Amino acid sequence: MTEQTLVLIKPDGVARGLIGDVIARIERKGLTLAALELRQVPTEVAAAHYAEHSERPFYNDLLEFITSGPVVALVAEGERAIAAFRQLAGGTDPVEKATPGTIRGDFALETQFNIVHGSDSSESAAREIALWFPALNS
Ligand code: CMP
């Protein structure tokens, strides 16, 4: 089934010059781009995006980090796009869970600085795409 998923290349990925590599992996997988923008994240958008983590001990650090520099927000589209991008990203913990060959497995050491975000379900994808790209699909 054709799906859309929201991907963020986080401030660490942008600062380390990994935008091209991440987008190349998305395109090589066969997904297409439905939206793409480099932007500074307003605190309100960051808080809404990560609302489900608001009770976690790392929440404040997460908001500080995601607003610390520009991110690339994009919508990738294709068959099983949500699972496909999560496969490309690898597990959240870049050492214990992500395997070599994945974005996090290849480029990251710490869970907080794990280069990319991808929607984790169709409900999250719909919510996140509406938050980041309200004009898309309307
Ligand atoms: P992401 O896929 O963007 O979704 C939530 C984010 O919280 C996650 O990637 C990590 O960057 C961050 N995160 C999750 N667990 C931890 C943790 N234990 N310590 C610090 N950051 C975390």
Image (cartoon, rainbow, N blue to C red):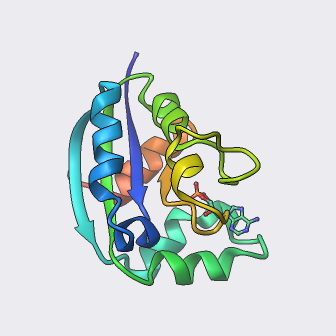
Q: Quadrant of residue 38?
A: bottom left
Q: Nearer the viewer, residue 123 or 25?
A: 25
Q: Quadrant of residue 126?
A: top left
Please say whether residue 97 is visible from this viewpoint. yes
Q: Position of residue 89 (x, y in %)?
A: 52, 43
Q: Is residue 83 left or right of residue 77?
A: right
Q: Is residue 79 above or below residue 16?
A: above
Q: Quadrant of residue 55?
A: bottom right
Residue reaching furthest to the top: 1
Q: Position of residue 73 (x, y in %)?
A: 32, 58
Q: Position of residue 47 (x, y in %)?
A: 53, 73
Please say whether residue 76 is visible from this viewpoint. no
Q: Is residue 72 left or right of residue 8?
A: left
Q: How many marks?
A: 0
Q: Quadrant of ligand 1?
A: bottom right
What's the residue at 32%, 66% (across, down)?
17
What's the residue at 30%, 58% (across, down)?
19
Q: Is residue 29 above or below residue 6?
A: above
Task: Give the quarter of the figure containing the N terminus.
Answer: top left
Q: Position of residue 91 (x, y in %)?
A: 65, 44
What's the residue at 47%, 29% (across, down)?
84
Q: Nearer the viewer, residue 115 or 34?
A: 115
Task: Give the quarter of the figure containing the C terminus.
Answer: top left
